[in-house]
Image: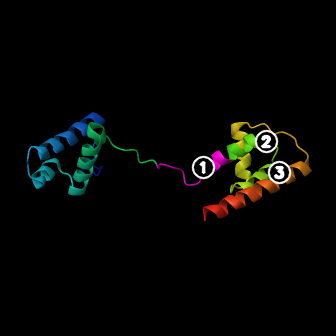
Amino acid sequence: MNNMPNFNMNTPKEVISHRFEMIKAKERGEKIADVLDEYSISRPVFYKIYCRYTEYGIKGLHDLSKAPYNHGRKTPFEKEACLFRLYRQYPFFSSYEYSEVVDIPPSTIQRIVKKNKFVKVYKPKREKKLILDKLKKAILKEKREKK
């Protein structure tokens, strides 16, 4: 007696043609229960495939990726774009000064700067502080106006 599970070794083309046959059987007017029995598939799976077919056509019969659409710990695109804009305007700020303006931890800013090979420019501390204070006030004013 063989204890190995029964794996379905169909190729993607065979799977797609199998799904297409099921849909055509339904469109010919066969009863759904008969189609489900004939192809050994559950009703929710059939309707999932059928809805994808009606929305996307033949391409909807392909298996979709199980990978997540986004990584849970990745820095959001909007925050990175804001950091890029700030870096173009103020290339002399440190990661700690950027973190006061953009809500991103300094270590993450350092990683982004290193990855994108940004070049730092020197500016005296006194001048940087004046610019940073003005920038913070402008951002606070902007946030108040949004509310």
Label 3 vs label 1, nearer the camera: 3
Disc 1 on helix, strand or loop? Answer: helix
Disc 3 on helix, strand or loop? Answer: helix
Disc 2 on helix, strand or loop? Answer: loop
> In the image, is residue 116 above or below residue 93?
above
Image coordinates of residue 53 in percent, x first then y, are 25, 43
Query: In the rendered image, which residue does mark 2 sit on?
Result: 91
Q: Main secondary structure of the magenta part?
A: loop
Residue at image position (80%, 55%) is: 134
Image coordinates of residue 112 in percent, x first then y, are 69, 44
Near mark 1 (Cα within 10 A), the count class, few <14, some 14-19 or many ≥20, is few
Number of numbered discs visible in the structure rendering: 3
Of all residues, the one furthest to the front in this rendering is 145
* Residue 100 seen from this side: no
Q: Is residue 93 left or right of residue 30?
A: right
Magenta region includes residue 69 = yes
> In the image, is residue 125 above or below residue 11?
below
Amino acid at circle 1: Glu
Name which of mark 2 and mark 3 comes first in the sequence.
2
- Front-most of residues 114 and 36: 114
Residue at image position (81%, 56%) is: 133
Query: In the rendered image, which residue does mark 3 sit on?
Result: 131
Amino acid at circle 3: Ile
In three-dimensional space, the C-alpha distance between marks 3 and 1, rounded to whole angstroms, equals: 23 Å
Q: Report the disc number at residue 78.
A: 1
- Start-end of magenta stretch: 68-82
Image coordinates of residue 36 in percent, x first then y, are 15, 52
Magenta region includes residue 98 = no
Q: Are marks 3 and 1 in contact (CB under 8 Å)?
A: no
Near mark 2 (Cα within 10 A), the count class, few <14, some 14-19 or many ≥20, is some
Residue at image position (23%, 48%) is: 50
